[in-house]
Image (cartoon, grey):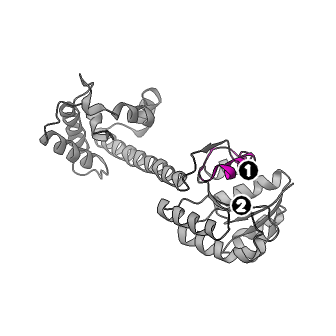
Amino acid sequence: MDRIAVLGMGLLGRGFALNLLDKGHEVRVWNRTESRAASLGDAGARVATSPAEAVKGAERVHLVLKADDAVDAVIEALRPSLAEGTPVVDHSTNLPRRVAERHARLRAEGLRYVHAPVFMGPQNSREATGLMLLSGPEEDEAILRPALETMTGRVIYLGSEPDKAAKLKITGNGMLVMLTAAMGDLFAMGAASGVDHEEILALFEQFAPSAAGMGRRAVGASRRDPPGFTMTMARKDVGLMLETAGEASQLTLLPAVAAAMDRAIAEGRGEEDFTALADPTR
């Protein structure tokens, strides 16, 4: 079995460490707040007091940290003990520009840094389910994929561009955040009109437009003839939503959508399909 270091004992890092222990690996863990790592010792992990101690002799290092500054600080701290060629796999959600800069800098200095962000919750990391993105040199993908596949439900390799995984990770998180905000607006509209949120959820169990489906419909929508649902008609319905919600409702997205539609109609796009709002080819 491998000797593996996991640095960062938040909810995801803890799940990764426990799953790797279950698989029989020798696992060393570290966390800036030591008390959060201490309980992993009872599960069989070796609790290190520093990043350098954690990675000493490790065949693979996993970072699960909060932000770019933490990633840079921890990598700098672990370097004195990192064996040459040992991959440092960063699962943190980071700024793409900084991932690209970090990758170039560390590679030039002989450190094998790979970015592999995840769409996983604590239970996913504990059970090795969910989705992991990976980008970077093809040789790293070939070497790391077998090990990474034991930590998640699926690994998607996105090519050699080192920050591609970072770009798509924040894109996916953006969809989650905006979808949540959209549901908040719909719940507010429902509350204002006497519709319970459970009724709204029941509707979406039967009628649930997918993000991918709507996105594909948007591509080329400004040139679609005939349109499926015009901007003018969609704007009329958004007006109904705003009026139903009333001024007392705290809406997040609908007012901005209405304003964007107003601009499109003013530009003469009222008879285009409403999905032209998101047409990346326009």
Residue type, mark 1 in image = Ile
Please state the horizontal and vertical placement of residue 18, each as a whole percent of the image: 76, 56
Q: Are marks 2 and 1 in contact (CB under 8 Å)?
A: yes
Q: For the residues marked 2 and 1, what is the alpha-carbon distance in whole angstroms?
A: 10 Å
Q: Position of residue 281 (x, y in %)?
A: 32, 39
94 is higher (above) or lower (below) than 160: below
Q: Which three-letter amino acid code belongs to the residue tagged 2?
A: Pro
- Which residue is labeled 1 in the image? 143
Out of 246 and 49, give the one closest to the viewer.
49
Neighbour class for label 1 at 10 Å: few (<14), some, many (≥20)? Answer: few
The answer to whether residue 148 of the structure is visible from this angle is no
- In the image, which residues are magenta? 127-152
- Given residues 251 and 13, the one toward you in this image is 13
Q: Secondary structure at mark 1?
A: helix
Which residue in the structure is indicated by mark 2?
Answer: 87
Residue 52, placed above or below residue 193: below
Image quadrant containing the N terminus: bottom right
Q: Report the number of discs.
A: 2
Front residue (pair 183, 72): 72
What's the residue at 66%, 74% (across, down)? 32
x 46%, y 49%: residue:
171
